[in-house]
Amino acid sequence: MTTSRQRGQRRTLPAKLDVHYVKSTSCRVIHVSGAWGSITPQGIIHAAVYSEHVFLPEHVEYPITEDGKVTDVRFPGNVITREIEAELFMNQEVATSLRNWLNDRLAELEILIEQPRKEQTDKETTP
């Protein structure tokens, strides 16, 4: 069987690509404080993203004074919990694309942050 490519004809590329984004049933919004990870033996980047917060106990017993008041319990302030929210595995191409996307968002954010500062400086220097 002869295909169009075998007959020397070129494949025509579409003028546009229509992409639809659909949220999976497991999609959720998470806060990311940082990431920890490594390179797998297969050369894949592994990043475990976490949210960071002070230690939250699973159970607390509050002492009650003789006059019936509940006393406050203090927890050590130097205990931090890093809760792993998601683990990401990506190849080098995807990681590079993600880095570039983040760099673009950071550049946009820097412009938004600098704009009010410049406006304030202009007000202060205008006679």
Image: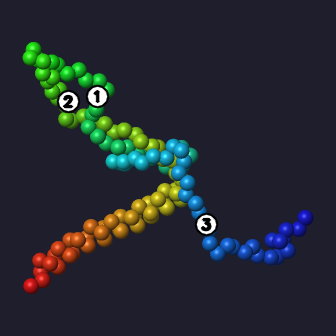
Q: Which tag is nearer the camera, tag 2 or tag 3?
A: 3
Residue 25 visible in the picture: yes
Looking at the rendered structure, the kind of residue marked 2 is Phe
Kind of residue at badge 1: Pro
Comparing labels 3 and 1, the label whose residue is closer to the camera: 3
Q: Residue at x 45, y 46 (%)?
A: 28
Q: Identify the residue at image location x=51%, y=43%.
A: 26
Quadrant for the C terminus, please: bottom left
- The answer to whether residue 38 is visible is no
Badge 3: residue crowd in 10 Å (few <14, some 14–19, many ≥20)? few
Neighbours of disc 1 within 10 Å: few (<14), some (14-19), many (20+): few
The percent coordinates of residue 71 (x first, y second) are 14, 24
Q: Is 20 positioned to the left or the right of 121 in the image?
A: right
Give the residue type at disc 3.
Answer: Asp
Give the label on residue 57, or none.
1
Q: Point out which mark residue 123 bears.
A: none
Pick the front one: 43 or 100: 100
Tell me if label 1 and label 2 are in contact, CB under 8 Å: yes
Question: In the rendered image, which residue does mark 2 sit on?
Answer: 75
Cβ–Cβ below 8 Å for labels 3 and 1?
Answer: no
Q: Residue at position x 62%, y 68% from top? A: 17
Q: Nearer the viewer, residue 50 or 42?
A: 50
Can you identify the residue that label 3 sits on?
18
Could you tell which of marks 2 and 3 lies nearer the N-terminus? 3
Badge 2 density bin: few <14, some 14–19, many ≥20, Cα 10 Å: few
Instruction: Using the rendered view, name the quadrant where residue 118 is placed.
Output: bottom left
